[in-house]
Image (tube, helix red, strand yellow):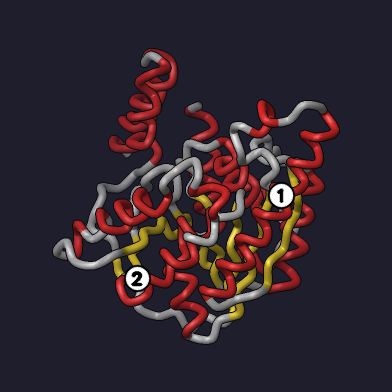
Amino acid sequence: MIGNVFRAIIRKVYRHLLPQEAKNSLHVWTMFDIPDRPPDVINTFADSRVLVLAPHMDDEVVGCGGTLRLHALAGAKITVLFLTDGRSSDPGLVEQCQSEAELRTAEADLSALRKQESRDAAQILGYDDLLFLDRPDGALTVDQALIHQLAEVIEQRQPQIIYFPCALELHPDHWAASKLLALLVEARLSPALTAACCRAYEAWTPLPANRLVDISDVFDTKLEALRMFTSQLKHVDYLRTTTGLNAYRAMTRDGQGYWEAYYEVTAAQHAELVRRIAQAR
């Protein structure tokens, strides 16, 4: 009881007194009610149905590509749902085009390329069920139509495990994707969601992991899949940054190999976490 009162006081002080620039680094502490401890290791990948929410083409590989490969090798049926169209993923595209019509054509071509890159990566990792919702890249918003689309996919595919961006991700599209799953919980439109194991992955922002997956044996395959995203590797060295992140995650495992980290929760727990983060923002 005293602990709950103390945490409530701390959150109130945090929200009203701390400067905005301090909140990014401190708000995580206010979100969790138990002390941290070493993550548990996931050793089984035999679940037959897996769903991945990817805000952009390449998030599925950066965030959980090694784990998806292990699921595929175990015979799982993997579906990846891409939320945005990828047309805004070249920061220099506007300057390169001489007219609005030329820009629209270039954006459509880039969107098609991004989708093919994910198809090529999926072939390497061992799955082929890719769905594209084509929401605006860089401007993902959650509305009732999107919530219903996600509900329809979940009810059709009946996933046992759902991978999705962590609610602490800095990219606004990643936050929107995490919020989407939480709002679907609140909407009560998907009975299958309540039974699914939900695992948040990291891409732009390290998360407070409670699960780890050893991807050492398939790490080269993950990098091979990541190399398919030539349109993005021109702008950011994702091979280097992803290698660093997966190597760092070996810290609690004697520093050996490559690991992917997750924050595993129930759907209801995820919805509560998103609500608390939204209040603190």
Instruction: Count up the numbered dots.
Output: 2
Q: Which amino acid does label 1 sit on?
A: Ser
Which of these two is toward me, 45 or 187?
45
Please indicate, yes or no, whether residue 164 appears anywhere in the rendered image: no
Q: Where is residue 28 in the image (x, y as percent from the top left)?
A: 37, 36
> Where residue 106 appears, x then y in whole percent?
75, 41
From the image, which quarter does the N terminus lie in? top left
Give the amino acid type for the residue marked by disc 2 in the picture: Ile
Residue that numbered label 1 is attached to: 111
Q: Name the residue under label 2.
A: 215
Q: Left of 251 or right of it: where is 245? A: right
Relative depth, front residue between 255 and 158: 255
Q: Would residue 49 be visible to someone looking at this image?
A: yes
Residue drawn 61% across the image and 60% down it: 117
Q: In which quarter of the image is residue 44?
A: bottom left
Q: Tags 2 and 1 in contact by the CB under 8 Å rule?
A: no
Q: Name which residue lies at 64% across and 70% down.
A: 79
The image position of residue 247, as x and y in percent, is: 26, 58
> In the visual, does 40 lie left or right of 204?
left
Looking at the image, which residue sits at the far right?
A: 101
Report the Cα–Cα distance between label 2 and label 1: 30 Å
Q: Which of marks 2 and 1 is nearer the N terminus?
A: 1
Which label is found at residue 149? Answer: none
Q: Nearer the viewer, mark 2 or mark 1?
A: 1
Q: In this view, does 121 lie above or below 270?
A: below
Residue appearing at x 29%, y 52% in the figure: 244
Question: Is 60 in front, or is 277?
Answer: 60
Q: Which residue is drawn at 38% across and 14% down?
A: 19
